[in-house]
Amino acid sequence: MKKLLLLFSALVIISCSHPKQDVDLIIHNAVIYTVDSSFSMAESFAVKNGKIIEVGSNDSILAKYTGKKLDAQGKAIYPGFIDAHCHFYGYGKGLQEVDLVGTKSFDEVIQRVIQFHENNHTDWIIGRGWDQNDWNMKVFPTKNKLDSLFPNQPVFLKRVDGHAALVNAEALRRSSVSENTKTEGGIIEVKDAKLTGILIDNAIDLVAKIIPTPSKKEARLALLSAQKNCFAVGLTTVDDAGLEKQVVDLID
């Protein structure tokens, strides 16, 4: 009789217990920063249809839900980060250009430009990031090597701070910049009565303004490339500090 009572009690408990809910993913054994009003921390959460449906302890979440499990092995998990002031579209465009940041010599700049040209078929070769202060010869470069390598293709390479640019003869020809061109608030560098290819401050715009606007396909690629890299480091929201209407429309 005692055994029958125990069996009956067990059946009652089982019948009263709630079945586990199916979810797509259970993250457990984590250090979860909820960033709620009290900055509470948790160990586990359940995800269904792309949304976190509950956060709690390992025991509570594993007891309530069933689905694919991922052991975070004590790693930290944060909500998506927000960049409140960035140049998201500009960053994406930069990913389609020659990255010259960290170059240790002008020869390295040239090598990166050559490599970019071999892998990309663009009308203009555009790059940014060189800094002559990082080179042994801490002087502005000249356009001579670019002229010999790219006699018929315009090249536009901005300095890391955006206050100077090196352009080749073809870029100067297309923008009608000569030794006699005048500009306010900028410098067109001339040595020995010849253009060096260095443009400073407002003089940069003389060439920059004729660079073709990216096509819709190129702009879309820039946005998607920027998005991919942002997601990779946990950035899920960005505020772009300045966009033209056609880019806003494209994003929409």
Image (spheres, helix red, strand yellow):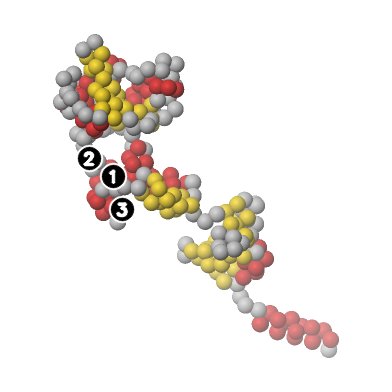
Would residue 115 be visible to someone looking at this image?
no
Residue drawn at x 16%, y 20% as measured from the top left: 180
Q: Which residue is mark 3?
A: 251
Residue 92: image location, x then y, percent: 35, 42
Q: Which residue is mark 2?
A: 213
Classify mark 2: residues with Cα within 10 Å, few (<14), some (14-19) or many (20+): few
Identify the image quadrant of residue 28: bottom right
Q: Which residue is mark 1?
A: 219
Q: Which amino acid does the dot numbered 3 rest on?
A: Ile
* Mark 2 vs 1: CB contact within 8 A: no
Q: Which amino acid does the dot numbered 2 rest on?
A: Thr
Residue drawn at x 62%, y 77% as measured from the top left: 18
Judging from the image, what secondary structure is the residue with disc 1 in? helix
Nearer the N terminus, badge 3 or badge 2? 2
Nearer the N terminus, badge 2 or badge 1? 2
Instruction: Measure the C-alpha gap from mark 3 to mark 2.
Output: 16 Å
Outermost residue, right side? 2
